Amino acid sequence: MISLRKSKKRNVRNKKMARKKIIAGNWKMNMTPSQAVELVNTLKPLVVNDEVDVVFCVPAIDLVPVMEATKGTNIQVGAENMYFEDKGAYTGEIAPAMLTDIGVKYVIIGHSERREYFAETDETVNKKVLKAFEYGLTPIICCGETLTQREQGITLDWIRQQIKIAFQNVTAEQAASAVIAYEPIWAIGTGKVATTEQAQEVCGAIRACIAEVYDEATAAAIRIQYGGSVSAASAPELFAQPDIDGGLVGGASLKPDFGKIVNYNK
């Protein structure tokens, strides 16, 4: 029994070594199309790193020019949101086929700002996750707690609930290819960063939750990002943690400093 447990742990550890870091910029509601192209041209030479998957998640109106501007580079492009229906009378929404048609690979789902300002729920997040997989898009599924929830000591319960609902009816194979972004809401855009220990504790709990829902192999494969005021200074220590596989970066992704975050290991 002991040797079996050891070999299982060794397998999980080996898979951990195989997880490629993923560092994504979330541009939020910034950059006109012309500004977007200018920013891409500035960042292109700065974000070259073969050991990292680099993703620019940009506003819908910027997707086409950014796809063009990133051709022939290591940069992959993601959307910041999409709807859970194929098409129809949903004024102002973006259909998944609109994203795949232009070559978009990733989509952020359930960011705390979408939940707070646009009434997204765990249930609508789940619908979007299922629809993203149906269209071959990789969802970056966001979760996170408020300062009140952290102070009340319910962070892990809250996060586990978000994860379990988000992954309802998602297969193990699909889950293994997903990306989860843990963003403590109290750290987004505030300059406050969760301590390395806090970030690792929650990301470790997320991986354990995925292992409960699926199995150890799925948990070992899924990539978990930390987000929330990630900077060039905090990135190396955060990304060195065993359960943190990169970052979802907000404000810093709009500056040349993003290159330093992407090249945290150099």
Image (cartoon, rainbow, N blue to C red):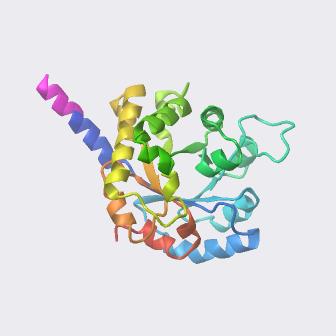
Image position of 97 with respect to 35: above or below: above
Q: Residue at x 30, y 48 (%)?
A: 17
Q: Residue at x 49, y 63 (%)?
A: 229
The mark total stands at 0
Is residue 97 located in the magenta-colored stretch of the structure?
no
**Quarter of the image with the C terminus in it:** bottom left
Is residue 6 located in the magenta-colored stretch of the structure?
yes
Q: Main secondary structure of the magenta part?
A: helix
Please state if 65 lies on the left or on the right of 218 as rendered: right
| Residue 57 point in image, percent of width and height | 61, 57
Q: Magenta span covers which residues?
A: 1-8
Which residue reaches farthest left? 2
| Residue 216 point in image, percent of width and height | 33, 31
Please state if 213 lies on the left or on the right of 200 as rendered: right
Image position of 81 with respect to 54: above or below: above
| Residue 188 point in image, percent of width and height | 53, 59
Image position of 33 with respect to 4: above or below: below
Could one spot residue 102 in this view of the protein? yes
Which residue reaches farthest top? 1
Could one spot residue 54 in this view of the protein? no
Image position of 125 with respect to 258: above or below: above
Query: Quadrant location of residue 124?
Result: top right
